[in-house]
Amino acid sequence: MEEFAVAGVVPAEALVDAASDKEKRSPRKSTRSRHPYLSGNYWPQPRELHLVPCTVEGQIPACLAGGQFVRNGPNAALPPAEGENYHMFDGDGMIHGVYFQEQADGNVVPLYINKYVRTDIFLASSYWGLNLLPSIASLIDPLSTTVRILQSIIRSGAIAFLSGSTRLSTANTSLVFHDRRLLATCESGPPMHVNAPELETIDWHTFPDDAGRGLSRVQGSSSEWITGHPKVDPVSGELLMFGYDIFQLFNPHIRLSILDSQGVHKHFQKPVYLQSAKPKMMHDFAITQKHVLIMDLPLTMSPFNVATAKPMLFFDANLISKFGVLQRDDPDQIVWFETESCMIFHTVNAWDDYNEAGQLVAFCLVACRFKGAKLVYAAGAIEMPQTGEDVVHLYYYRFDLTTHKISHEYALCDFPIEYPSINTQKLSLRNQYAYGASMREGSFDTALNGAQIDVIVKCDIQALIQEPPTGVKVATSNAPPKMKHVTTLLLPQGCYASEATFVSRDPADKTLDEDDGYLLLHVYDETTQDEYGDAPDDIGSEVWVVCAKTLILPPLAKIKLPQRVPYGLHGLWVSGQQIALQRDATFNTKTGTMQSTRATRDQTSVSLIASFYKWSAIWAGKSALHGVSNGRFAISMLLSAVLAVLLTYRALTILLQAMKHLTCTV
């Protein structure tokens, strides 16, 4: 792709100016992929801008002063060519931010910034000029042969080995703020510490204790992987997270960690064993003040699936869904609940339920529930299994802790809803309202032209629990609103949004109503696209500030950004106080922003991380065999030797091809 030509050690500089000389000399023809999740405003933004002042239409609420609205999402530095596999969840992490800088005169000036997260994968792939990781689409396509899947896995491992990339995370999923650090997450590695508002990439964060012991003693091992959605308890400030390991052949389990507000380990890498024979893809979980809920659902994720001629990521509809409720103070105490096959990618919230005598009797959960995993296929533009419609609905579960049965499970809406958000001060507590993304037509499971969010909904979930809609089926997909206790924001025709983020009008005032605040969301006008359906990079998106009580248009403020923000994943509000108290940062009086006091990875050369990861195969083998006994260690050594032979063969093949090319040239 001409727009994304990569040269030199620092790839971002080569990506800033996208227009090529060829495009200036001749009438432009689209060189962009027609893949539904690369077309239009899904196309990656190649330019990085630094704290550019934005124009404002309307009035910015005073509570936003000093804070920053940040949003993460995949943004491929090297987009695939037409016809190559691609998945919505592929791509390097890019964070877009709007910093509400307070001026000396009291005015607030919004400054836009966007930066790639400088992961090992980003640095190495940009340096070498090729994608290191196989597309998720290659690993989930039901039509992929075992040979093709193995080829993708071996190719990825070989390239990663030779390139020196020690960690495979792209840090492209979400953001969380804990212990005075802003962290970019992805479930294939540890989070990346990023400085706000400059969005400088500082380093991987493995949550080390005073002795330096973090997620794993081996850098880059699967023991470092954590969920893309860690939870911060608003009452205690504790961080709760888990990780899963796709290489477990026996006794699959997750690793649960709970850290206090200062990062001190309360429970760390605590194994919690599943009731399944295979590792599962577990994207999210839920917490209450007393409990943690993990979801053992039918979406298996293991490279060993290929042994049974199945994709690496495979939804087995014959399996049941299992929910484990465990105690935060004693994770060994776990109660399992079973129900019919389903899939949940995002939870909304959970709370403990007490009876009139004050006894804790149940765990209540609200989540976005699919019947199957069609979303995974739709996001890769892959032909989906013929299993009927699968509309995602807001769903309520009540897990009775006395009978160990699910006492309630039913839909709370008759329209599709995903990308949920709440007032985070109510996380783990009984809350009244949830916000989410929806659409006038279609659903998230079948939107093969790229899911387009043109409706934001507000649901009174407590009222809906008491008065649920009737007759909601798996395929029920009404256009919102069609029911009570739901408020909608319908975007103008041609305008589409990303996930909405709630900001309280005054977090310190505990007397405020739960919905007394604002929603921040990115909005893009697709009517500005050219005749090819391409979205020009310099025609900006907008950030809308909407009253969270009423969802009334026009917005209270429209912040006009200097460039396009592609549709992405999850956002976060970082308060001015959080920014001012960040670790490893100091206030720069010249720029008026907090800047890192540590060396950052923004100018890191790939040679500094190129250790060639000599022992990765050995540790992968030990992880796969679930043990370190002499016999298993010997087998893992054998596996590493086989991999070394394959790598040597590949290197010789490349060398012979190069010599042949030179001979032909001469």
Image (cartoon, rainbow, N blue to C red):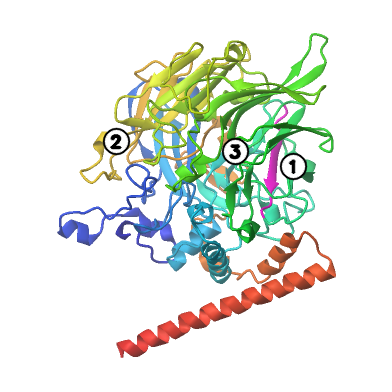
Nearer mark to the viewer, of 3 and 2: 2
Which of 323 and 608 lies nearest the eye of the viewer? 323
* Residue kind at label 2, given as amino acid type: Glu
* Residue 11 percent location from the top left of the image: 42, 60
Q: Amino acid at mark 1?
A: Ser
Q: CA distance from mark 3 to mark 2?
A: 30 Å
Residue in view at x 50 percent, y 33 percent: 390
The residue labelled by disc 1 is 257
Where disc 3 sits, the SS reads strand
- Foreground of the two, 155 or 56: 155
Residue 301 placed where, x, y %?
Answer: 62, 50
Q: Residue at x 51, y 44 (%)?
A: 376
* Residue 238 place in picture, x, y as percent: 72, 34
Residue at the disc numbered 2? 526
* Whether residue 459 is visible: yes
| Residue 213 sits above or below residue 629 on the image | above
Q: Nearer the viewer, mark 1 or mark 2?
A: 2
Relative placement, left or right, of 616 versus 370 is right
Where is residue 412 drawn, in percent x and y?
A: 56, 19
**Residue bounds of the magenta highlight:** 236-246
Residue drawn 48% across and 81% down?
653
Q: Which mark is residue 176?
A: 3
Quadrant that contains the C terminus: bottom left
Query: Which marked residue is nearer to the observer: mark 3 or mark 1?
Result: 1
Mark on residue 75? none
Look at the picture and state if 611 lies above or below 496.
Answer: below
Other residues around mark 2 within 10 Å, as few (<14) / some (14–19) / many (≥20): some
Q: Earlier in the sequence, mark 1 or mark 2?
A: 1
